[in-house]
Amino acid sequence: MYWNEELECLPLEKLREIQLQRLKDTVKKAYEKVPYYRRKFDEIGVTPDDIKTLNDIIHIPFTSKADLREVYPFGMFAVPLNEIVEIHMSSGTTGKPVVAGYTLQDIEIWGEVMARCLTMAGATKSDIVQVAYGYGLFTGGFGVHYGARKIGAMIVPASAGNTRRQIEIMRDFGTTILTCTPSYALYMAEVAQEMGIEPTTLKLKAGCFGAEMWTEAMRTEIERRFNLSAFNIYGLTEIIGPGVAHECTEKKGLHVFEDHFLVEVIDPDTGDPLPDGKRGELVLTTITREGMPMLRFRTRDITSIIRDKCPCGRTFLRIERIRGRTDDMIKVRGVMIFPYQIEKAILEVQGVEPHYQIIITRPQHLDEIEVMVEMSKETFSDEIKHLENLKKKLERRIEEITGIRVKVTLVEPKSLPRSEGKAKRIIDKRSLSE
């Protein structure tokens, strides 16, 4: 099912023609209207006239979060402030927040790409879409809202939080599409059972889950608990918000809406382009955004490009599910690991819940990892020797996947913090002990 079949299935030759013209226009606008970009271009001796082919994108300087923070709040805007109709921001947990500005046309584009996402998940005018991403300065809630409105579906703007009320709404209103973070979806299922409501009896048929890294095993767990089809959605504030890419029913990578966003994957250390299929850092360029064009933005997300023809018929390339972030990599005893590897191991072992925390310490100058994992209710009442065997099984599986020996601590059910937004998985105490 398509929202805009003509554009989503464009012949590649026509798509490349559109991309090139839009890239040239965007680069010209950024150079002429954004002093920061002009300075960056002038420093390396590049002008808009140097962009003659799509491959010439490599001559454009990268943009990073640090660049955006340097010109906080409005230094990246390419239009007068009276043309900006909406503002969103990142959380700013690691420094000044990143500000994103939208014109009316930008909001239209956002609604368009999100309509495509929701349609990929099976949403139609007849559906009831419950938006459990946060509204406000966070882009999640509003992005889904605009897409659902464009489709004509009934919108339940629940926002994040008030979980018991969320469950009641799903039951009473007959919600069919759920959108939230995957960790919050699992928490919702848990709360529903506490309320005496079996999640599989709800009318949910599909969910669009994103805003945090999650594994295939977590998808299976969400689908099992809710009896729905779980889809992966990707986006970020700096580019537009949710709606950059989404899975089709094949669920073999996320289609990037290439008529609006250009994709590169680079070596995070050297900045050099990587071939298709090779994992590296995702770099995105907007080619239709008016208020704040973004050139070669380094997302820090790890993925690879898939160009094989998709059976769904869409011609847009795909990216594999995000495997982590360059700033989420944990370097322990010289080995690089990602939280998703530990999550994968946990979800492969029966007797535990998909709730965990990774605690890193450095006693006596040697890195140590402790993984706290919640037991299931059934396991919690087991004999000590059974729990010890479960602990050893988890430690062995994590070591097989990561190559690192860790200490697993089994904790009581529902004893680890729950999140109504992005789950905090890693607690790195090494800097505190140094």
Image: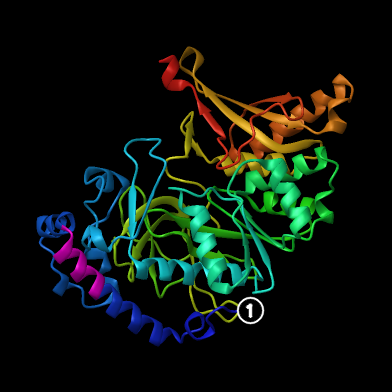
Query: What kind of residue is marked 1?
Result: Met
Expressed as whole percent of the image width and height from the top left, the position of residue 335 reads 49, 35
Expressed as whole percent of the image width and height from the top left, the position of residue 137 reads 43, 48
Expressed as whole percent of the image width and height from the top left, the position of residue 37 reads 18, 58
Identified at 26% across, 46% down, the residue is 73
Between 151 and 215, the one lying in front of the other is: 151
Between 261 and 75, the one lying in front of the other is: 75
Q: To which residue does mark 1 refer?
A: 1
Tell me if I can see residue 319 in this picture.
Answer: no
Read off the magenta span.
25-34
Q: Secondary structure at mark 1?
A: loop
Between 260 and 197, the one lying in front of the other is: 197
Q: Quadrant of residue 53?
A: bottom left
Identified at 27% across, 55% down, the residue is 62
Q: Is residue 256 magenta?
A: no
Q: Is residue 141 left or right of residue 46?
A: right
Q: Quadrant of the C terminus?
A: top left
Between 306 and 353, the one lying in front of the other is: 353
Expressed as whole percent of the image width and height from the top left, the position of residue 393 reads 76, 33
